[in-house]
Amino acid sequence: MSSTWRRAAVFSLFTFFARRVVGDNAINPSFSYGTETVRGVNLGGWLVLEVRSPLGHCQPHPWITPSLFDNTGNDNIVDEWTFGELQDTATATSALQNHWNTWITEQDLADIAAAGLNHVRLPIGYWAFEVGPGEPYIQGQLPYLQNAIGWAGNHGLKVIVDLHGVPGSQNGFDNSGHRISYPEWQSNSTNVQRSDAIVKTIASMFANNPQVVSIITPINEPAGYDGDQMLDVLTQYYYDSYGNVRYPFGSSEESNTVLLMHDAFQTLSYWSGFQTPPGWQGVALDTHIYQVFSDSELAYSDSQHISAACDYASSLSGFDLWLIVGEWAPAATDCAKYLNGRGIGSRYDGSYPGSSYVGSCQGLTGPASSFSDSYQTFLRQYWEAQTIAFEKGAQGWIQWAWKTESADEWSYQAGLANGWIPQNPTNLLYPNICG
């Protein structure tokens, strides 16, 4: 047993006996996770600016609103760090404030609810809460976070507040806020302590509003593939986050807020038995599933994409925590502008360094008006296959993303408008597509 797991065992016993003393106050979340189906979208590209990572592990910002980066006139601005560092502060602040004011409004939340969805996942960076010496981030996101919570409440939506970037970067990618050669979050205890403090702040902000903020995610897509140097720190961080999220009142009183941990790109079996009931209450696991970031998957035929999606119904099933597919998309190529990084090409058409040509990107990205009828039929079939599988094998899904500027194949909003996403997510045209 590793030292981390030993610490977990001690904490688990403490929590168990604390419940025995004060009475077992099992979690009573405002959404019936495990029996009700999660159906939602990510409010991507709003309060975190993201550029595609080279390994394609997470979603970028420039392909959602490429004009925000293009308008800087500086090709070296590749993440939120450099957005504040490499241009005039007043100029950067004005651009961000305009973006925050216009990209997501209450009408978007109303439209999301009207589409039959029940959750939104809202990424936010640590710099919205505190900025350290030498960190060029621009603040001002918190009023918009609070607005979004209010709008979600007005329209009956649950919110997952997702700490998308942490000090030092948890994966070295642009989506963490700072693109660096290797993640540094796990190598400096101060980074982890700052993250703990921010999770406490988030939990405290919303502890009395679990009817809207039903879930908190303490870190997005940490680089578990880097091995024990990341995973040992991460597992301890998840234990600490359990206490911070589930006990935010400074006492033995439990909240009704669920802790949602990302799988760190590990297999589900790696997390088997981790923070499971009865010793732990209100814990869920987040997994992200795309088929567009490897040459082998990009070479799939349409039917192979659908078959691979359907297979998740069995591979996700039977896990011992609530399981949510927190990111996925109907897109089946990496053709969207800047998807792999600003100025970097696509694997699909062979313009990405080292990739092999699969086909032309013409008609596979951009405005829906450029999509053929057969392509839109595929998008509908692929969307349905994924939702069927994720609802059967897991507790549900949260699509990336609600809207984009010029890549409609990724946009829930565009899918609704053009018919490859149904107005009600349960109204399927191909209910037997997975057999």
Image (cartoon, rainbow, N blue to C red):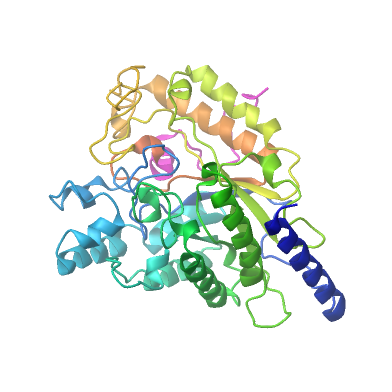
Above-or-below relation of 289 to 364: below
Q: Position of residue 34 (x, y in %)?
A: 73, 51
Instruction: Count all numbered tags in the image, as a single digit.
Output: 0
Residue drawn at the location 41% of the way across and 59% of the way down: 168
Q: 155 or 251: which is nearer to us?
A: 251
Residue drawn at the location 40% of the way across and 23% of the way down: 375
Q: Per the image, is 425 magenta?
A: yes
Q: Quadrant of residue 157?
A: bottom right
Q: Position of residue 161 (x, y in %)?
A: 51, 62
Above-or-below relation of 301 to 78: above
Work out whether residue 47 can be spotted: yes
Work out whether residue 157 can be spotted: no
Q: 294 or 322: which is nearer to us?
A: 294
Tell me where the magenta segment starts and ends, as one range: 411-435
Residue drawn at the location 36% of the way across and 52% of the way down: 45
Q: Per the image, is 413 magenta?
A: yes
Left or right: where 48 falls relative to 400: left
Q: Position of residue 184 (x, y in %)?
A: 43, 56
Left or right: where 383 falls relative to 324: left
Q: In terms of secondary structure, what is the magenta stretch mainly? A: loop
